[in-house]
Image: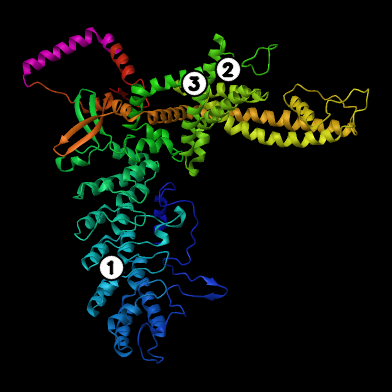
Amino acid sequence: MTSEGSTHSDCANDAASPISNFSLVLSKPMDSNITVCDNSKCDNTDSPSDDVTSCLLNVHSTNKCEPNLIHEKQSHKILKAVTEGDILSLNRVLEEIEQLSLECTDKPAQDFLMYILTSKDTGKTCLMKALLNINGKTPKIVHILLSFAEKKGFLDKFINAKYTEENYKGQTALHIAIERRQNKIVKYLLDKGAKVNVRAQGLFFNPKSRNNGFYFGETPLALAACTNQPGVVKLLMENSETDVTIQDSFGNTVLHALVTVTENAKPHNTFIINIYDKIIRSFKNKFLETIKNNQGLTPMQLAAKTGKLEMLKYILSREIKDEENRLLSRKFTDWGYGPVSSSLYDLQDVDTSSQNSILEMVVYNIHIKNRHELLALEPLNTLLQMKWTKFARYMFLMSFLFFFAFNIIFTFLFYRPHGNQQGPIALNLSTTSGIFQLIGHVFNVISSAILIIHEGAAILRLKPSDLQSVVSDAWFHVLFFIQAILVILATLTYISGVEEYLTFVALAVALGWTNMLFYTRGFQSLGIYSVMIQRVILHDVLKFLLVYILFLFGFGVALASLIEQCSEGNVCSSYTSFETATVELFRLTIGLGDLDLQQDSKHPTLFLLLLIVYVILTFVLLLNMLIALMSETVDAISKESEHIWRLQRARTILELEKRMTIYFKDIFKIGEKCKFSENDIRLCLRINKVKWTEWHSQVTCVTEDNELSQSNDEEFVLSSTSANEEVDISKRKEETSIMFENEEHAFLETTL
C-alpha cells in the first residue's frame, strides 16, 4: 500500500478536518521487500524481534521446538513464497508447520499455527503479505491460505487479524484487498467471513499531514468509496452486516470521508459525487446526511467549512424526483413555462436561523480561499441579496446617518477657529448654546458607550485563531472601538478642564472621519475603491514603513551625534537633536529638504556622505520601490476587488442581522414554509430563473398530421422568409445579443 496508497493520499485536502500541517515519521513501512540497514546491521521488518517473550506458548524447551526459532525460520519461508507467488514452496511450508504443530506444542494447534503465520512486531499475517504483493498467483495463494486456516479451525481469527503496529493499527486483509482493487478477492473474503465494520485507526490512516498518509474514514466501505470502486461499495452496501452509519475517530461517516477527499479538480469530484449520491439513495435510512461528526458538522456543513465548491453545489442543488428518495432533495422545481422556471431551495442548515449555518460559516471563515465562489452558489447568493433588499440596506443607511451625525456633532463641539480661545470653555446652561453643547456632549457619550459595548462584544467573540480576520474583514470593529474610547476621554478631559483634551480630540476627529470609509461598502464602485486602498495600506505601506523606520532611526541617531554644541551668538544647525534630525531626514525623503553642508558638524565630509547615502536608500530606492509595489498590488487586487467587496458586504449584512431583536427577525424572516408530503414540511426559498440556453436545447419540433395544413404552413413560411428575410435576420441578431449579453453565464437570473 505504500506505493499505490501514496497515489490516493493526494485525495485528502489540507483544509479537511482530520488533516493539518504536521510531519509524521513512519518508523516502519506497511510492507517492503527492501531491508534497510542501520549501522551495518540489517533486520527484516517481518522477522520477530529478539525481545519478544517466548512464553506465548507452552512449548518444549528444545532447539527443534524453540518458538522463536520456528517462527523466524518458517515465517521467512512463507513470506517469501507468498511474495513471489511460489505455490509449491507455500504448500511445502504449510505441511512443515502443520507437522510442527503436532510435535512441538501441547497447546491447541490453531494458536500455534496462527502464531507462526503472523509477524510478532506488526501483527501482519502472510495473507496480508500476499495481498500487499499482488501478482498473477495471488488469488490462488489467498485460496490456499484460507482453505488451510479453515481446515485447521482458525479461519475467523486468521482472516480478521489486524495490524498491531501503531501506524497501521486496525487494518485487516479486507482493507488491503479493497485498496489493491481486487474485487474478486474482496468478494471471496466476505464470503469466507471477513468482518466489514472494522476500523483502521493507525497514524497512517489519520494523518496530520496529507503527505504522510491517506485519510479515508477508517472503514472498508469508506475506503472503497474514496478510491472510486462503485462495485465494491454496492457489494458492501448489500451486505447485511455492514453498518453504514458507523463513525470513525473524528466522528465522520462515509459521507464525511467523501467530502474530505474532495478536491477542486472536476474529474476527481465527478466520481466522488456519483458515489455519494448512490450511497444516500441506496441506504434505507434517509437521514444519513444528518449525522454530525465530533465538530458538530454534517457532510454539507463540512463541505462549506473546507471550501469544497463542487460538493457543496451538488448538495445544495440536489433534486430527486422519484417518490422513494424525494426526501433527500434540497431543490424542488415548482413550475416552468418556456425558459422561466421557479424552484424551491431548502434553507435547513443554510440560513442563520440554524446552528453552524452554511451562510455564517462561509462568510466568517477567512481560511476558505474560495469564499466568493461559495457565496455565488444558490441559494446563498439570492439569500444574501434578499436580506440586503428587505432590511439590511435600510439598517445600513440608518447606521450611516447615525455615525455621520456623531462625527458632525463631535467636530463642531470641539472645533476652535484660529485666534479664538483654545482652552476648555465652561458650559453656561443659562444660554441656548450652552444647552445645545450639553445635549451634544451627552449624545456623544451615550453613542460612544453603545459603540464600545457593541464593538467590544464583537471583538471578544473572535477566537484566537481568527485574529487574521481582524485585519482582513473585521478591522472596523477595532477602529470604531478605539474612536469611541477617544471620544469619551476627550469629553471627560474637556469637562474637567484638562488642557490635554486637545490630544484626544485631534485623534478622535481624524480617526472618526477615516472610519467613514466603512460605509463605502454600501456602493459597489466606492466599495471596490476602498478595498484597493485597504489592501495597499496593509500589504505595501506597512512593509515600507517598517524598513523606513529602521533607516530613519539609524541615520537620525548618527547625524545627531555629529552635531557640535551650539555656542552663544552663533547660528545653530537645524540638526540640534534627534527629534529635529529625524524631521529633517523625513523632509529629505519626500523631496522638501536640501543637502547643504552643516558647518556645526564635527566631520562635515562624513556628515554629507551619510546624508547622500540616506537619500539614495530612501528617496531613490524605497519610495520608488513602494510606487512599483503599489502599482502591482492595484493590478492584482483589481481582478478580485469585486469579490472582496461582496464578501465585506455579506459580512455587514450578517452583522446587521445580529443587531435585530427576535421580534424583528421574525418579521423579516426570509423564506416560506412548503409542504411536500404529509411529514415533510420545510422552510424554503423561492428562486425564479430564466435560462434560454437550457430551454432551447430541450425544445423539439412539432409536426402536424394534417398534410394540407402542413403544406399551407410551409408555403406561408417560405413567402414570409422571402419577403422579410432581412428583417428576420436583424431581429434574430438583436434577440441573440439580448439572450447572451452575459457570455460568461449564458443565462439571466431574476430573483422574486
Q: Position of residue 251 (x, y in %)?
A: 34, 53
Looking at the rendered structure, the secondary structure element under dot 2 is helix
Q: Which residue is mark 3?
A: 403
Q: Position of residue 502 (x, y in %)?
A: 65, 22
Tell me the residue at 68%/28% (across/down): 624
160 horizontally vs 613: left or right:
left
Q: Residue 139: which numbered mark, if any?
A: 1
In the rendered image, which quarter is residue 340 located in? top left
Give the mark nearer the N terminus: 2 vs 3.
Answer: 3
Looking at the rendered structure, the secondary structure element under dot 3 is helix
Q: Is residue 264 visible?
A: no
Quarter in which the N terminus is drawn: bottom left
Decide: few, some or many residues near mark 2? Use Cα within 10 Å; few <14, some 14-19, many ≥20.
Answer: some
Decide: few, some or many residues near mark 1? Use Cα within 10 Å; few <14, some 14-19, many ≥20.
Answer: some
In the rendered image, which quarter is residue 114 located in? bottom left
Quarter in which the C terminus is drawn: top left
Given the image, on which type of amino acid does mark 3 rest?
Phe
User: Magenta part of the protein: which range?
Assistant: 705-729
